Amino acid sequence: MARSERDELEETALPAVLVRRSDLPVPLTHPARSFFGGLPKLPPQFEWPTAEVRANDTLETVALTFVAQIDLAELPGSGWSPFPKRGTLYFFCSSVFVGEGHPPCRVLYSPTEGGAYPERAPPSNLMPLAGTDGDAQVKWLDPALDFHSKVEFKYPLSFRLFRDFYFRDDAVGGERMIEELRKALGPGEPQDNDLLQFRGAAKYEKDEDWPFNWLLITYVVRSVLWHVQRDLTRGYYGKPLTDEATVELKRLRAGAVGWLERCRALTPMDDVDSDTKASFRSWWVDVVQAYKKMDGQVRTYTGELAADLGNAINHTIRCMAAQHADACDDAPAGYVANLVRQNHWKTPAAEDGKRRRFRTALHQMLGYGSGPQDATEVHLEDMLLLQMQGDLAFFDWHSNVGGVLHFWINRDALARRDFSQAVATYECD
């Protein structure tokens, strides 16, 4: 009897582990033993890994970005995994992905459990997230002042078993993949649109919920200043600025500096009174209108200002959640619910399974993994230590949902527990 496509697919099945992060960040003091971001609980004999990273066309030796810590004792199942039954893996990687199909990385292994040591303080040469220049940087963060310009937010992890299959662009494989994911994650939630993504300036103008604290005002003002300074110094793609545009940009800069001076005199998490809220929204709308008039004369377009505002709102809520468990009670409930919802498993469509591309970031260990190019093919004989898909949790250096960061290791090296042989690949569609 001829075998069906499903029968052939079943022969490729491998046990794998889905890695699920918490919906919101937690304070660094949270007792999680497995987590994304935050600070690693490194044994004292381990040094924080460094590498040469390319930034601004030059190589610079920096401390790598810490991306994950996983206590292997927390993984589900037993007997089948090639990992040690006990111990902790620590993942470090360059956060500069532009032009780096194989970003510098290090994976460390300790036989001790993930809570055995306190958090390691970040070294002075820790690289800024996304490096020192580029579109993936968070515009309103200053590496000299802001902790989260170099250290990602901390997200505790949970784990669920599933079976992974070997296929590419295959309808039967996609159908089987969705079946397995639904067993592990449930049917999924509706594909609700993000409340803030692609939101226009007109909606923000009418929304009285923001700004809800002075930290958000600080971030929004810094974002405006970043755009104004770039437009003043770089002109319009090689063309000099007109006198009118120069005068207008300097006016916007003066207004932004004035708001920053007010911010410095106040506590970042303090509430903003209704009059100040209205005044700040009016100022921001004036900035947007000014940029509309300068369209075609400067690099910044108005959609960038609205996108920055939405991202700044989400970033501020993350900062509040990282301060203490109840801090988000002081943020608008709709904004918080929107951020939480972004991490929820969404109902997959048949095409999602076929292309192994889902609305929800699928992080995993073992199995085949997913990628938009050929990393999973090239490393078919290797073991997948960790897959981190582009996720809004990693704003902004790895938030692109089309990007995938993999950590791979040769099977023999894994058997020897030689994690110095691990390599990273980064792909983006």
Image (cartoon, rainbow, N blue to C red):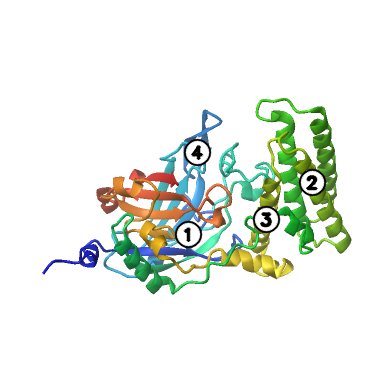
In the rendered structure, the answer to whether residue 20 lies left or right of residue 238 reads left
Please report whichever mark, 1 or 3, sits nearer to the chain's N-terminal start.
3
- The amino acid pointed to by label 3 is Gly
Alpha-carbon span between mark 1 and mark 3: 20 Å
Residue 386 against residue 247 in the figure, above or below: below
Q: Crowding at label 1, few (<14), some or many (≥20) Cα neighbours within 10 Å? A: many
Element type at mark 1: loop
Alpha-carbon span between mark 4 and mark 1: 21 Å
Q: Nearer the viewer, residue 27 or 212?
A: 212
Counting from the top left corner in percent of width and height, residue 331 is at: 72, 66
Asked if the residue at tag 1 contacts the one at tag 4, i.e. Cβ–Cβ closer than 8 Å, the answer is no
Asked if the residue at tag 1 contacts the one at tag 2, i.e. Cβ–Cβ closer than 8 Å, the answer is no
Please report whichever mark, 4 or 1, sits nearer to the chain's N-terminal start.
4
For marks 4 and 2, give the one nearer the viewer.
2
Q: Nearer the viewer, residue 192 or 419?
A: 192
Please report whichever mark, 2 or 3, sits nearer to the chain's N-terminal start.
2
Label annotation for residue 361: 1
- The amino acid pointed to by label 4 is Val
At x 33% / y 70%, what residue is drawn? 77
For marks 2 and 1, give the one nearer the viewer.
2
For the N terminus, the image quarter is: bottom left
Q: Crowding at label 2, few (<14), some or many (≥20) Cα neighbours within 10 Å? A: some
Element type at mark 4: loop
- The amino acid pointed to by label 2 is Gln
The residue carrying mark 2 is: 289
Asked if the residue at tag 2 contacts the one at tag 4, i.e. Cβ–Cβ closer than 8 Å, the answer is no
Element type at mark 2: helix
At x 80% / y 56%, what residue is drawn? 267
Label annotation for residue 310: 3
For marks 3 and 4, give the one nearer the viewer.
3
Asked if the residue at tag 4 contacts the one at tag 3, i.e. Cβ–Cβ closer than 8 Å, the answer is no
